[in-house]
Image (cartoon, coloured by chain):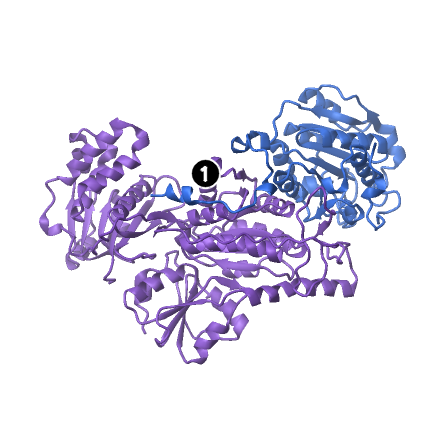
Chain colours: A blue, B purple
Amino acid sequence: MAIDINEYNSKLKPTWCPGCGNFLIHMSLKKALSELNITPSQTYIAFDIGCNGNGADKINTYAFKGLHGRAIPLSAGLHLANRKFTVIADLGDGACFHEGLDHLIHAIRSNYDITIIIHNNQNFALTTGQATLTTDEEKPMYGLPDSKPERTLEPSEIILSANPSLYARGYSGDMQQMTELIKAGIQNKGCSVIEIMQLCPTYNEECTPQWFMQRIHKIEDTNRTLEEARKVGTITDESINTGIIYRNTQLKTFYELLENRKDTQTELVDEVKQYDVQKLFDQFK
Amino acid sequence: MPANRYCIKLGGESGQGINTLGILLSKAIKSIGYNIFSYREYPSLIKGGVASYQIDLASKYIASSSKSCHILVILDPEAVHEYLHSLNANGILLYDDKQVVFTQEEQDWIKQNNVHTIYLDSQTIAINAGGSPIMSNIVMTSFLWKLLGFNPEDLTNIVKEIFASKGDDVINKNILCLNAGYNASEFKNEYLQNTLIPEQLKQENSSKILTGNDAIALGAISAGVRAYYGYPMTPATTIFKYLGNTYKETGILIKQAESEITAVQMALGSMAMGTRALTATSGGGFDLMQETISCAGITETPLVIVLAQRIGAGTGVPTWTGSSDIHTAVKSGHGEFPKTVLCVSDVQSGYILIQQAFNIAEIYQIPVIVLTEKQIAESLFTVETLPQPLQIQRGTYDGESRYTITNTGISPRWIPSFDKKPYLNTSDEHNQNSQSTENAEEIKAMSDKRMQKHATLLSNLPEPTLYGDPNVPTVLVGCGSTKNPVIDAINEGMNIAYLHYEYIFPTKTQALMNLVSSGKRIIFVENNQTGELGKILTEASGYQFKEKVLKYDGRPLFLEDILNIQI
């Protein structure tokens, strides 16, 4: 029995542009939580700044809308303090690959047991359409009438270079698949990166639902080497593969590798009390 | 020259083991019943350059360094030129390298000041005694020990203790070298220093020596800190070292983050989830943390940061001391929001203030910055016991809305739990129900609510403490490490009192203004260029300091710097 999805609704209605991919991403996240029977009070979402972050007060879970680019380290801190919570970092391609790129790489290599949802709409939309590293190289953008001089980078290359525990790609027009991918991310023990190719009818109007539908190709969830995953993950002019691209079930999480926490059953939140430091003090001579 | 203390300085090449030798000697001197205060000078590099280790010893508690020493032990020819002039008149220079060549100026200076120079071929003595060349340091130390007039058994005990993990062979060789150094024929009775050295305590000495950073780490453990997130930066790094090296005993989660931004964000996240987490940094790292301080301010999330100061803007002088980040701490973060800045001065205050910082951060749901300085962070203090720990206060209580407007400004905050109502912490301006707002009335009401916490907190903070005789005409004012040479100067008989600020923001001014209105001569003393605490006090009280003693050359305020103030 899934939890009623209305449980996850706040009193406010979303404010995104008509046709924005965020509506269905937001809905898929709620649906994934409900289908996994994770209650609003068992969920903690760290929202970044950007159009996605405007969803923070539109969902009824524990949440923290913090700073631009910092949803990932904030999530890591939330998670390590109480691993019983389902912790999700929700951020855009600007936050993830520009302001906070270091956090993405280090979170993957640290392998915190969190789920990172990247809303990849190929631009900084909330500040009205600046280029990101996923923006098409030829495309004129805000303040860049002749397009950006920098090269485009492939998120899958960045993510796979750090050997993630799970990497999946969804499309904001396919709620059913997104829900399944987010569920897989939450259920995976380790750092799960879910990249969502997001419609942005205002600042990326060329990439219409039809444009995406011609290119989207769903792939199977099978064992792949990193090399195979790179091939499958590469976006070409003709095709964008969606589905679970890579899993590495061998990786231990950050917390599991902490020698001093191995035999501890409690969480850090349970342990705040006065500690007698006399023995430690006595070790000083 | 201070009368009630004796000062030893070791000088050598950086990376030559000066620090290890200094700690060994500090422990040995402490073990025979002295109070010591040890201070390091070293360059920001791993090998090469000169470094020193200075030990001041006294029968009473001291917490400051002297500017000049009675005896200088030189282990590297370059160091002699750097440190020769820090010797007192009639002092002793002990060196062990034939390559030491004094310039004409140095030869004249040695003569004029009646300095005794003693050359000891420590390496040959070590080898002849059956040790290795590196044990020349032990030869020098034991010869020094003899000059001081101390019993060789006491030094032997400490050597055994320090080298315990290295095995019997190393210990035995070191002891052979120790004895050879102690009995070296270069010794003459006229060199004996015992008339200059204060009397040692007669009772058994159970005191410990630890650094200011050790005290902050112990206080954090005591306060229930369960996670430490750090990024290396001198002079904050040794907090990480202590908490890391004791993590098996304490169970504290240790994370070396990829940047200071990450470290402080992880701390913020863990605090929001309801545990206690700490991060520590220095100037540049603190700058990176400031956006998060602002975020903690508006989201009303408890946050504690230790800011261990070193001197200078930019990279500055990374391994030297100063207190030039007071203003940065008080003014940190964009926008307007309440925060607290506390200022550590020694082991006791480091232990207590870090506990207080967590209580204030949680009760008032604000960022708290705990300032220390390299001179406190890395120096060794002698202490008998730690003060009684503070009771943990978390200030949590349940409510309907996370940002409910109250008289005190303090809203309900409950630790996230499966059986409690979820809420949103948001850095968007918001109404009482965490909904983002651009409504004029709501913006003003929430801003007023937050700032009300500043007023509530100010009314609950203590006034600064007055040390010394309140009837004397001259009062010095300061914070942080300023306290230590000033109190030591009072104990040397200087006719001053001292007003000491531990809680520097929000700022209490009544005690200061009472002194001003009673006609005292007020002298402001700080280890920075522009009188940063003074500016904070002026802003809060309107009082303009007419007399300031400011030092900003990377060196601490030495005892002589205070004694030389004309009163």
Q: Is residue A114 visible?
A: yes
- Image x and y of residue A235, in percent: 77, 29
Question: Does B266 appear above or below B445?
Answer: above
Chain letter of the residue beneath label 1 in the structure image: B
- Image x and y of residue B144, in percent: 19, 45
Q: Nearer the viewer, residue B425 or B84?
A: B425
Q: Nearer the viewer, residue A46 or B408?
A: B408
Count of residue discs: 1
Task: Please tell me in which quadrant of the rendered image residue B418 appears.
Answer: top right
| Left or right, residue B498 beside residue B259 | left
Q: Is residue A132 visible?
A: no
Give neighbour class at mark 1: few <14, some 14-19, many 20+ (Cα, 10 Å): some
Task: Please tell me in which quadrant of the rendered image residue B75 appears.
Answer: top left
User: Which quadrant does the N terminus of chain B fall into?
Assistant: bottom left
Question: Does B419 appear above or below A217?
Answer: below
Question: Mark 1 — residue?
Answer: B246
| Left or right, residue B196 beside residue B39 | left
- Image x and y of residue A161, in percent: 64, 28
Q: Nearer the viewer, residue B492 or A97?
A: B492
- Image x and y of residue B414, in percent: 67, 50
| Left or right, residue A275 beside residue A78 | left
Residue type marked 1: Thr
Question: Does A245 appear above or below B140?
Answer: above
Residue that appears at 73% across and 65% down: B444
